[in-house]
């Protein structure tokens, strides 16, 4: 069994990866097995320092041969090192599951010896869990760039989800900060997995929960516009479930890296923009013009609306769904409620308030039966929307922060 010292090292080393959330899997459970990876059988939650507490989030090893400048586990870092065997990890997962500590496993690793050696040991771990321990629970496996494609394909038949972290948004930044990695070593495996999943769609046994990736925001000079265009391409070409954005934290010091945290507000705005890409029909070009960052004072949908006032106001009693979804303060559920309710009667502002539409934003962009209650001055609207953002210090959280400094940015309805 893995000892407490190695367990602490390997779990602490894994905490910087944020792309480990899960939303269930369509994998069929084996009879008399242990655990359940179905949509109702897996949940997740995060502690303030970024640990996922319902998946065991652990590295197979933190002994890395690579020297990525931003990574706390890089080869020349002076940190405690540890490794675990596949059998030790299997015993740990089963013991934790039986004690109701976890619902599943997120397994990653530093590149120990070689990509193939590391990927082989990780694949051996999850195959043992499935076949020897008959574990039905959720498994998220981190792919190793540069590993043999046959190893990766085999691992994908036993994992519920896999992720290859792009880490940095451009080839130039990757070459500067992680010279032993290449863009192709990450993107090519993702593309092969996406193609193989489409070919295996009828069997549903190949990565039933799909793929994710992560990008570090602020370690390199790319703008939000570049980041969102890359995310849009990943969703379109690779059918990713999620792109995760991780605000840069200076865990290590180097002249090529910023000395300060990027801050949670930029990360938060990127997640809001990502939501618009996936569920609201926006394009990256609409959300963030070329070469620009997302504004901090209001959310991306408000920013788009203020740049495109020629499309407003829209009449809620006749506007199509696509137009309603672009109104600040009207979310997807609110838009569908409006469509359903207006079949029976004309709606007014009181009706919208009962539907929990955020009228302090929406009123500037809509009419109800021709009535307008907002401001018709674009400058005044900008001022009112920016005043709606609470003054908070957006920074990375710490277990030892004062309560008043540990408040993260609130997530308002888009």
Image (cartoon, rainbow, N blue to C red):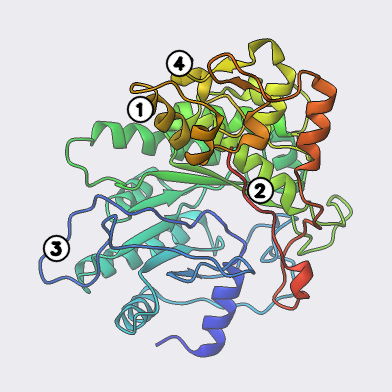
Contact (CB < 8 A) between labels 2 and 4? no
Residue 152: x and y in percent read 38, 48
Question: In this rendering, would 332 be left or right of 103?
Answer: right
300 versus 256 height, above or below: above
Contact (CB < 8 A) between labels 1 and 3? no
The residues tagged by marks 2 and 4 sit, at their Cα atoms, a distance apart of: 50 Å
Give the residue at mark 3.
30
198 versus 282 height, above or below: below
Give the residue at mark 1.
340
Residue 131 is drawn in which quadrant? bottom left
Give the residue at mark 2.
180
- Looking at the rendered structure, the secondary structure element under dot 4 is loop
The residues tagged by marks 3 and 4 sit, at their Cα atoms, a distance apart of: 46 Å
Residue 364: x and y in percent read 69, 25
Give the residue at mark 4.
320
**Of the pair 14 and 329, the residue shown nearer to us:** 329
**Going by the picture, which residue comes out furthest to the left?**
31
**Going by the picture, which residue comes out furthest to the top?**
310
Disc nearest the viewer among 3 and 4: 4
Contact (CB < 8 A) between labels 1 and 2? no
- Residue 278 visible in the snapshot: yes
Residue 55: x and y in percent read 43, 68
Question: In this rendering, would 387 be left or right of 320?
Answer: right
The residue positioned 53% from the left and 70% from the top of the image is 61
Label 1 or label 3, whichever comes before in sequence order: 3
């Amino acid at each position: 069994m893995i000892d407490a010292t190695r367990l602490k090292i390997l779990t602490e080393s894994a905490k910087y990866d944020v792309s480990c959330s899960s939303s269930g899997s369509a994998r069929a459970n084996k009879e008399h097995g242990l655990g359940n990876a179905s949509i109702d059988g897996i949940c997740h939650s995060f502690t303030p320092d970024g640990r996922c507490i319902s998946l065991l989030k652990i590295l197979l090893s933190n002994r890395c041969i690579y020297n990525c400048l931003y990574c706390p586990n890089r080869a020349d870092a002076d940190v405690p090192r540890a490794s675990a065997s596949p059998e030790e990890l299997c015993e740990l997962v089963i013991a934790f599951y039986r004690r109701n500590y976890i619902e599943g496993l997120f397994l990653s690793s530093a590149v120990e010896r070689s990509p193939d050696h590391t990927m082989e040991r990780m694949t051996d771990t999850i195959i043992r869990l499935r076949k020897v321990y008959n574990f039905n629970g959720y498994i998220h496996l981190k792919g190793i760039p540069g590993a043999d494609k046959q190893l990766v394909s085999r691992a994908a038949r036993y994992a519920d989800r896999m992720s290859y972290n792009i880490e940095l948004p451009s080839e130039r930044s990757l070459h500067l900060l992680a010279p032993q990695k290449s863009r192709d070593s990450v993107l090519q495996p993702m593309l092969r997995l996406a193609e193989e999943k489409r070919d295996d769609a009828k069997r549903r046994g190949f990565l039933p929960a799909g793929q994710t990736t992560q990008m570090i925001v602020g370690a390199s000079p790319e703008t939000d516009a570049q980041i969102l265009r890359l995310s849009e391409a990943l969703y379109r070409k690779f059918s990713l479930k999620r792109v995760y954005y991780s605000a840069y934290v200076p865990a290590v010091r180097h002249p090529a890296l910023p000395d300060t945290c990027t801050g949670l507000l930029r990360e938060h705005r990127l997640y809001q923009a990502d939501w618009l890409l996936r569920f609201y029909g926006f394009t990256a070009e609409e959300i963030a013009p070329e070469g620009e960052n997302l504004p901090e004072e209001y959310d991306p949908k408000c920013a788009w609306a203020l740049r495109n006032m020629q499309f407003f106001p829209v009449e809620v009693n006749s506007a199509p769904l696509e137009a309603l979804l672009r109104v600040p303060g009207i979310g997807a559920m609110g838009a569908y409620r409006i469509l359903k309710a207006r079949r029976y009667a004309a709606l007014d502002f009181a009706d919208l308030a009962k539907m929990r539409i955020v009228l302090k934003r929406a009123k500037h962009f809509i009419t109800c039966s021709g009535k307008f209650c907002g401001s018709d001055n674009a400058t005044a609207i900008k001022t009112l929307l920016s005043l709606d953002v609470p003054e908070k210090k957006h920074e990375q959280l710490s277990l030892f922060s004062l309560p008043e400094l540990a408040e993260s940015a609130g997530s308002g309805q888009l």
